[in-house]
Image (cartoon, rainbow, N blue to C red):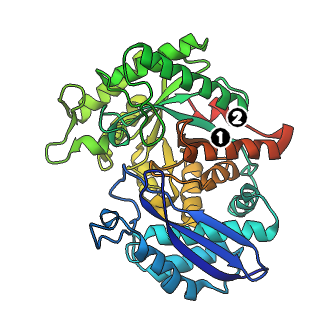
């Protein structure tokens, strides 16, 4: 078995032009891997800490990551060089121990995750395997004999219209997404989605809105009169494309409620469309009304990240027929998912590598969620890069769903295209999760 011989880190840039960490790992026999760490705008309080320099406003407004790069080169590398390259669990445990904090605040989750993923890439290269096949081997090692472990292509959850922190707060809700639930393969799902995306741009322009403006994740960012107008536009476009609502396509929402929740008053302020104030019961009633009115099958962060009682009520009302995803609520942390299971809060977990900081901990969250009946959605961040690791991760773990962003901007398409290549590599027997992944 090969050993890790060298780590190199540098400061590169993400899709918002902000610095991020890139790490390269080289083995003793010359195998090599690289990973780039993404960054979120809509970050929850319970995420692992992304280390920024904060030293000089003149240098990237203090957003530089040279401290994290230094931590890779001077603190991490001397302590992990020589480790067996395929022992991902041992590597990640060592990274956590070196940092020594509960949220990776000392070295930075961006430094730690960069190393964790770069080593996985190098190990796959050392084994002569595609990354998704190597990750699938690691995943299968965690499964019981009765648990299926075959790779499965995910159902894409695709951003069509953006609001919130992803598009200048033009709307309160953060993302309005398209689900190609009638598709029989990943290729068909992507073709359908691309068709609708381009048609939506024409519909938006025809109605006099800014049809060419896009947000951080590639979704259109028109200044609409209400949150519901975004759903209406997507449904109108789907019908023009000949799709049957609720059969060929459905809607998913990322409400991102934590970012317009006031804990001091316990109210949610819908400021973009009328400055309306709602308590938890009012928010639940609003979402329930939308579910009855529209073909909505998935709602992410419908309530704030610490509104546990509200989440339980929301799940009691809608959980039997809508996927209720916790992003800020769970933050890819096993202990928070455990709390959700105990409180019957939500029924799905958004999986983001940099919320927790290592590949092994991400596997832990995926497996714990799955074994407790929660659906899993591997997700990108709003500040993304050309790194495509999450595509391989989603397939390798049969996560069922993936949330990358829209079908525009190359940092998004890199991942969609990677999934096409994986589908091709798997051949005619490639399995596609489809609508069944939603569980509703």
Around disc 2, counting alpha carbons within 10 Å, would you say few (fewer than 14), some (14 to 19), or many (20 or more)?
Answer: many
Q: Position of residue 6 (x, y in %)?
A: 64, 82
Is 57 placed above or below 223 here?
below
> Going 46% across and 80% down the picture, which residue do you hit?
70
> Going 63% across and 85% down the picture, which residue do you hit?
81
Q: Nearer the viewer, residue 58 or 414?
A: 58
Kindly indicate the quadrant of the structure image that contains residue 142. Answer: bottom right
Q: Residue furthest front?
A: 58
Q: Position of residue 393 (x, y in %)?
A: 64, 54
| Disc number for residue 186 | 2
Q: Earlier in the sequence, mark 2 or mark 1?
A: 1
| Disc number for residue 154 | 1
Q: Position of residue 296 (x, y in %)?
A: 47, 24
Q: Nearer the viewer, residue 104 or 338?
A: 104
Disc 2, SS: helix
Q: Residue furthest right?
A: 428
- In the shown orientation, is residue 41 left or right of residue 30? left
């Amino acid at each position: 078995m090969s050993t890790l011989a060298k780590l190199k880190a540098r400061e590169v840039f993400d899709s918002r032009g902000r610095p991020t960490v890139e790490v390269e790992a080289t083995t003793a026999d010359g195998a090599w891997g690289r990973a780039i760490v993404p960054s979120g705008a809509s970050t929850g309080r319970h995420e692992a800490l992304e280390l920024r320099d904060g030293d000089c406003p003149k240098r990237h407004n203090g957003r530089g990551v040279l401290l994290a790069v230094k931590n890779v080169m001077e603190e991490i590398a001397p302590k992990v060089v020589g480790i067996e390259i395929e022992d991902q669990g041992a590597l990640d445990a060592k990274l956590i121990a070196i940092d020594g904090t509960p949220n990776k605040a000392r070295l930075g989750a961006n430094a730690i995750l960069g190393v964790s993923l770069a080593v996985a890439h190098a190990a796959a290269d050392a084994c002569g395997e595609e990354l998704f096949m190597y990750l699938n081997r690691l995943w299968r090692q965690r499964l019981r004999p009765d648990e299926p472990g075959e790779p499965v292509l995910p159902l894409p959850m695709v951003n069509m219209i953006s609001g919130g922190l992803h598009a200048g707060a033009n709307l309160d809700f953060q993302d309005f997404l398209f689900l190609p639930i009638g598709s029989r393969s990943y290729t068909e799902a992507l073709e359908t989605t691309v068709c609708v995306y381009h048609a939506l741009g024409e519909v938006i322009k025809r109605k006099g809105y800014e049809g060419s403006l896009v947000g951080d994740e590639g979704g259109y960012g028109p200044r609409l009169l209400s949150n519901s107008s975004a759903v209406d536009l997507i449904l109108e476009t789907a019908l023009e494309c000949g799709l049957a609502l609720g059969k060929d396509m459905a809607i998913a929402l990322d409400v991102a409620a934590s970012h317009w929740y006031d804990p001091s008053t316990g109210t949610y302020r819908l400021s973009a469309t009328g400055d309306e104030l709602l308590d938890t019961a009012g928010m639940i009633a609003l979402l329930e009304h939308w579910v009855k009115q529209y073909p909505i099958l998935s709602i992410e962060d419908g309530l704030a990240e610490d509104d546990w009682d509200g989440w339980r009520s929301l799940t009691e009302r809608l959980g039997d027929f809508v996927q209720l995803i916790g992003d800020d609520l769970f933050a890819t942390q096993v202990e928070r998912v455990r709390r959700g299971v105990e409180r019957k809060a939500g029924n799905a977990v958004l999986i983001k590598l940099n919320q927790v900081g290592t590949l092994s901990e991400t596997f832990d969250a995926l497996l714990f969620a799955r074994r407790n009946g929660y659906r899993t959605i591997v997700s990108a961040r709003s500040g993304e890069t050309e790194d495509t690791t999450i595509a391989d991760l989603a397939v390798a773990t049969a996560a069922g769903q993936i949330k990358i962003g829209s079908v525009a901007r190359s940092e998004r398409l890199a991942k969609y295209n990677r999934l096409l290549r994986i589908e091709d590599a798997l051949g005619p027997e490639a399995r596609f999760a489809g609508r069944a992944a939603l569980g509703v």
